[in-house]
Amino acid sequence: MQDSAKYLIHADIVADGVVERSDVVGAVFGQTEGLLGDELDLRALQESSKVGRIDVAVESEGGRSYGEVTIASGLDKVETAILAAALETIDRVGPCRADFEVTKLEDVRAAKRREVVDRATDLLAEFEGEVARSADLIEEVRQTVRVEDITEYDGLPAGPRVSDSDAIIVVEGRADVRQLLKYGIKNAVAVEGTDVPRVVADLTRERTVTAFLDGDRGGDLILKELQQVGDVDYVAFAPEHQSVEDLARDEVMTALREKVQMEAVAGASSPHESVAATDGSARPAPPGSAATPDEADAASADEPATKTTGDESATEDDGDATDAPAEPETLAGHVQAVIDAERGDVVLLDGEFQELTSAPASEAFDTVADVEATPTTIVLDGELDQRLLDVAAQRGVEQIVPRSTDDFVKQPTSVRVRTAEQF
């Protein structure tokens, strides 16, 4: 079956007890039987060689079992996805309660193509007797891979992550997208001219957006139109009279690291000159708002933006000023300050238990979905339901402490949930 497989289904399993491979296989067959009808019956699909054997790797620790299930599929994409979704309905393995979570559907052919390109590059490098020719061929292979990485988003040149990334970078043309791809930045989309397409304008309202433009009049014009038709969060420019497509890696990373909030250049007659003239006076974007791993590394050197009250003339001698209450330094302290104090809020914390943002508990879902920096911990003075738990898992939250919990249909294994009573 492996030779004819087109897709691989990867799923993780967690069981509340000690189970073995045979228990997992039995659960897969037993609890999916009759669920999808005769055409997608797992036993029948195996007998007709449309589905391969069920590979299970499972181990036990601390009275629980953890494992991975892999199934090779010769079905089409839709049928494979349906079969994968059916695995997540399994809730018991042997005598134990269990959770199945499909982690990935892998295109076997795409993986083989990547292996071919990697192997071709290695083989070309072995021709030491033809150093110049081999170098040219290697670069050609690399350039081909980069060009293939350029996809289209509604007809516009784009990196492969634009369709699913929470943050995007808007650039001017296809060459800019290619240049950023060369440096590992895969979430850029090109407007291709000063007339900003509607699809880009719509994207700016849904994602965290950085406009990264040429340091010339053309870049200014594109930014001004983006201001009128979209919602840009941050702005970065190439150096004066330079284009993004001509920048070296360190110049790209420096420009993205020193991006400024849109408000800093709003209304300027020449935005690129305004950004260049700030010398640090325009507040850079806070760490965590970067859209790619490289950009995030570049931004990590900056201090986070600090909100002010708008009255910065107050001095220590102001007799009306009072000291703000100290922020809790531990998770238990935040639980006490939020839940035990019945604040009715949701508070998002970073890895050091510093507050990222807070909001009324009724707005918890939107707050977690929209926050720029991914929180490590959520403290909720309210009930944690399935919808909030799912978006927290999607954002990479590690733990949630609510006042209480609803009945979950499925609890992601990546998120630890403890109620306030457990503190």
Image: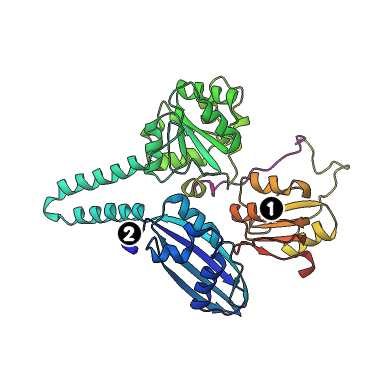
Q: Is residue 423 visible?
A: no
Quick one: 119 or 338, which is closer to the camera? 119
Q: Which residue is mark 1?
A: 388
Quick one: 14 or 143, which is closer to the camera? 14
Question: Where residue 260 sits: x, y (%)?
Answer: 57, 35
Q: Amino acid at mark 1?
A: Leu
Q: Quadrant of residue 66?
A: bottom right
Dominant secondary structure of the magenta stretch? loop
> Are the residues flagged by discs 2 and 1 in contact, CB closer than 8 Å?
no
Q: Is residue 107 visible?
A: yes
Q: Quadrant of residue 145?
A: top left
Rendered residue at 64%/54% (across/down): 390
Q: Amino acid at mark 2?
A: Ser
Rendered position, 328 above or below 369: below
Give the quarter of the figure containing the N terminus.
Answer: bottom left
Rendered residue at 81%/50% (across/down): 324
Disc 2 on helix, strand or loop? helix
Magenta span of residues: 298-312
Question: Where residue 354 sits: x, y (%)?
Answer: 69, 55
Disc 1 on helix, strand or loop? helix
Separation of disc 2 and disc 1 at Cα?
40 Å
Quick one: 187 or 408, which is closer to the camera? 408
Rendered position, 235 above or below 320: above
Rendered residue at 61%/51% (across/down): 374
The numbered mark at residue 4 is: 2
Q: Is residue 314 magenta?
A: no
Q: Residues within 10 Å of mark 1 (few under 14, many from 20)?
A: some
Decide if residue 51 is on the left or right side of residue 128. right
